[in-house]
Amino acid sequence: MELAYIPSPSRGVIHLGPIPLRGYAFCIIIGVFVAVWLGNKRWIARGGRVGTVADIAVWAVPFGLLGGRLYHVITDYELYFSEGRDWVDAFKIWEGGLGIWGAIALGAVGAWIGCRRRGIPLPAWADALAPGIALAQAIGRWGNWFNQELYGKPTDLPWALHITSSTDGRVPGYYHPTFLYESLWCVGVALLVIWADRRFKLGHGRAFALYVAAYCTGRGWIEYMRIDDAHHILGVRLNVWTAIIVFVLAVTYFVLSAKKRPGREEVVEPGADAADGEAEEGDKADGVEKAETDSDEAEADSREVTDEAGSAKKT
């Protein structure tokens, strides 16, 4: 009998009347809110306007979800298009199945559209979002816990994950909680990016490149631990190859960018300073107007008191 282990939830969905509340979806939604919240704080600190991050996220998030689902369906097509499978399941995103590689790639396209509409450089926006994206991944990985999926090899460690479901070929038992490993790794990546950005003033997309490289490093060894079905190339899982390639691209970009455009952008959002200045002038004008109003009211009160005193004296 195992004395210590991580229990799996008995179910990943709770029905509130006819409305299903799915743990997987909640994790994604919470992760998005955290990413936008932290990204907004970092964007404002860089000299941007309040709300800009959220406005661009309106483009990036849907594109990211679409890209993540497309990557999963394409790389695991047999789950939806092989004999005995229902292709309609490819649209059931709430049942799990988002590839981070596709989410980042197509999400970047959506972000580029949003940035272009606002006249904002995409690399600067990506730098502001980088640690928030890592935290969003850390939270989103708990969706795999709710679905009892993407776990690692069998283990008797005290933090083993207890899988109880036997659907879709699962074998109940105790396994490495790879979802937890990746979640903790992503938290570490977020802290690394925040520290490096403060220490070295990363700019022109280098904070985002650092996030990508650091994530790929962890994803590579975590992927080796997983036992779910996956396509292999030269005996290595597809996602490991993807992590290696993306890691090389991120490091290459980081090095070349540092040589070509050292330092950090002085202006990340054109017109933000002018807008802030106008807001301050407006506040000052409101203050002056209020002071004048208060002065007029005080003068009127003084006259009223004087008149009352005069009337009393006559009486």
Image (tube, rainbow, N blue to C red):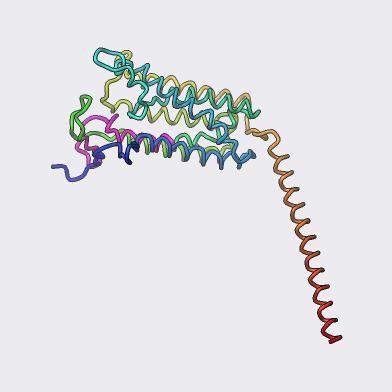
Left or right position of 71 against 288: left
- Residue at 62%, 39% in the rendered image: 46
In which quarter of the view is residue 224 placed? Answer: top left
In which quarter of the view is residue 205 placed? Answer: top right
**Can the viewer see residue 303 in this picture?**
yes
In which quarter of the view is residue 48 placed? Answer: top right
312 over 77 or under it: above or below = below
**Can the viewer see residue 189 in this picture?**
no
68 part of magenta stretch: no
In depth, the one of 139 and 73 nearer the eye is 73
Q: Position of residue 196 (x, y in %)?
A: 52, 38
In depth, the one of 224 and 141 nearer the eye is 141
- Residue at 17%, 45% in the rendered image: 3
Q: Position of residue 18 (x, y in %)?
A: 33, 37
In depth, the one of 192 and 177 nearer the eye is 177
143 part of magenta stretch: yes
135 over 75 or under it: above or below = below
Point out the image quarter for the N terminus.
top left
What is the span of residues highlighted in magenta in the rendered image?
Answer: 136-163
In depth, the one of 264 and 287 nearer the eye is 287
Q: Position of residue 199 (x, y in %)?
A: 55, 40
127 over 38 or under it: above or below = above
Left or right position of 77 against 109: left
Point out the image quarter for the C terminus.
bottom right
